[in-house]
């Protein structure tokens, strides 16, 4: 059965590749420089007929490495800086900006006809030391902190104005408890109150009225099995929309772990956000599992070898099934570059290419899903910008 299904699916991929090649002038080069044409069997070309953006975070910032840059440019139609737009990186010294990494990525994206997801304006992690130290030792008051944040958001969004498709405005504010709520101990909430999240969206919207503004978090599509965090974000965003806060989308990071199984309500959770009039996106997809060592990253269980492509595929299909799901972004495409081994002890094998940048079964599964979706999945709204 497995072999038969594979054969049928490979035939379908081949058929769609032919169709896409025939129509590739509009499918894969629309709206950008004419010179760059991705391969017909690339993820981005297969996703083009249904207008789904397939993305990657750029980690590490290795765009000089030809093998790395080739995959980044050919396979993906949207890119996210893994770190280069975070406050710690853009303002390492108070008052001195360094936009070089972000600018470089924007230029890479322009050359490869890619859209850019900006990440992230308001988060409790990767803040500059001068800021956190100043707050902790009392030299930066809460009033000053608020104006520093306002300036940070205005300056950064203005610097990249017109070049960012989706901004992850606010990142990771909710607790993983059941019930979940906005974390009162979050650095920003503790000093400035919950309303600071809405203010961040208002400031970002003023600075670039055409960018799509996202709230981004993990475990908001039932990943822990309870759906509590999803419920809390849902109630919160519904209330924000009622109050006219300019939030346009919800990003589920999509950091999965094979030991917990696939969160089967992901599609329903994405759909109910969409039913509020929001866009949705998978913003940081990876599927980690236990591995025998952090260099080779060979899964310790054979079952994980099956679960890994399965979970990538199910996650992609959840997005494909929801018309408002605009993009599916993986958090780095190669196992050697993934954040997982550094953050989850004993785990790895989280991405769609192996440590030598060879595509894994998860990559092929995504190709198959995209090829088949071209025949059935809803076509995304065409507009680049909000409204
Ligand atoms: C990670 C980066 O990949 C690492 O390089 C960095 O050291 C820490 O942050 N959720 C997020 C991302 O929103 O910004 C994080 O990225 C991964 C978890």
Image (cartoon, grey):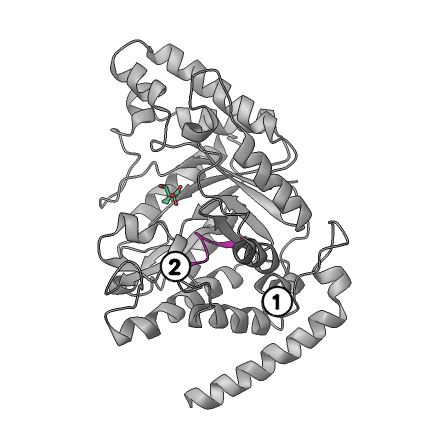
Span shown in magenta: 327-334
Q: Residue at x 43, y 70 (%)?
A: 360
Q: Nearer the viewer, residue 132 or 172?
A: 132
What's the mark number on residue 335? 2
Q: Is residue 332 magenta?
A: yes
Q: Quadrant of the N terminus?
A: bottom left
Mark 2 lies on a secondary structure that is helix
Q: Residue at x 61, y 29 (%)?
A: 208
Q: Position of residue 267 (x, y in %)?
A: 43, 60
Q: Is residue 185 magenta?
A: no
Q: Ligand 1 is in which quadrant of the figure?
A: top left
Of the two numbered discs 1 and 2 in the rendering, the one whose residue sits closer to the viewer = 2
Q: Residue at x 42, y 24 (%)?
A: 92
Q: Position of residue 378 (x, y in %)?
A: 60, 63
Q: In the rendered view, would you say 305 is above or below 196?
A: below
Residue count near mark 2 (Cα–Cα under 10 Å), binned few <14, some 14–19, many ≥20: many
Residue pointed to by mark 1: 46
User: In this image, 263 relative to 167: left or right?
Assistant: left
Q: Residue at x 65, y 75 (%)?
A: 16
Residue count near mark 1 (Cα–Cα under 10 Å), binned few <14, some 14–19, many ≥20: many
Q: Quadrant of the C terminus?
A: top right
Q: In the rendered view, would you say 17 is above or below 57?
A: below
């Amino acid at each position: 059965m497995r072999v038969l299904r594979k054969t049928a699916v490979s035939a379908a991929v081949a058929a769609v590749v032919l169709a896409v090649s025939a129509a590739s002038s509009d499918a894969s080069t629309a709206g950008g420089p004419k010179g760059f044409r991705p391969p017909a069997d690339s993820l981005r070309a297969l996703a083009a007929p249904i207008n789904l953006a397939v993305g990657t975070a750029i980690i590490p910032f290795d765009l000089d490495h030809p093998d790395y840059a080739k995959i980044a440019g050919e396979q993906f139609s949207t890119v996210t800086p893994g770190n280069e737009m975070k406050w710690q990186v853009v303002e390492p010294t108070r008052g001195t900006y360094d936009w070089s990494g972000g600018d470089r990525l924007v230029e890479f994206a322009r050359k490869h006809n890619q859209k850019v997801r900006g990440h992230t304006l308001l988060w409790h992690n990767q803040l500059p030391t001068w800021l956190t130290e100043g707050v902790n030792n009392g030299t930066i008051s809460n009033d000053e902190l608020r104006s520093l944040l306002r300036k940070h958001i205005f300056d950064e969004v203005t610097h990249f104005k017109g070049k960012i498709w989706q901004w992850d405005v606010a990142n990771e504010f909710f607790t993983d408890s059941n019930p979940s709520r906005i974390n009162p101990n979050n650095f920003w909430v503790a000093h400035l109150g919950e309303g600071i999240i809405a203010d961040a969206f208002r400031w970002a919207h003023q600075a670039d009225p055409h960018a799509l503004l996202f709230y981004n978090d993990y475990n908001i599509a039932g990943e822990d099995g309870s759906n509590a965090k999803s419920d809390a974000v849902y109630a919160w965003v519904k209330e924000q929309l009622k109050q006219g806060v300019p939030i346009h989308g919800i990003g589920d990071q999509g950091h999965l772990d094979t030991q917990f199984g696939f969160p089967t309500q992901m599609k329903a959770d994405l759909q109910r956000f969409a039913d509020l009039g929001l866009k949705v996106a998978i913003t940081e997809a990876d599927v980690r599992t236990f591995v025998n060592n952090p260099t080779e990253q060979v899964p310790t269980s054979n079952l994980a070898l099956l679960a890994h492509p399965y979970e990538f595929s199910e996650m992609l299909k959840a997005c494909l099934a929801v018309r408002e799901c605009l993009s599916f972004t993986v958090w780095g495409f190669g196992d050697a570059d993934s954040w997982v081994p550094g953050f989850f002890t004993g785990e790895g094998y989280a991405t769609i290419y192996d440590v030598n940048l060879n595509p894994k079964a998860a990559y092929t599964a995504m190709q198959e899903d995209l090829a088949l979706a071209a025949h059935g999945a809803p076509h995304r709204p065409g507009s680049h910008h909000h409204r």
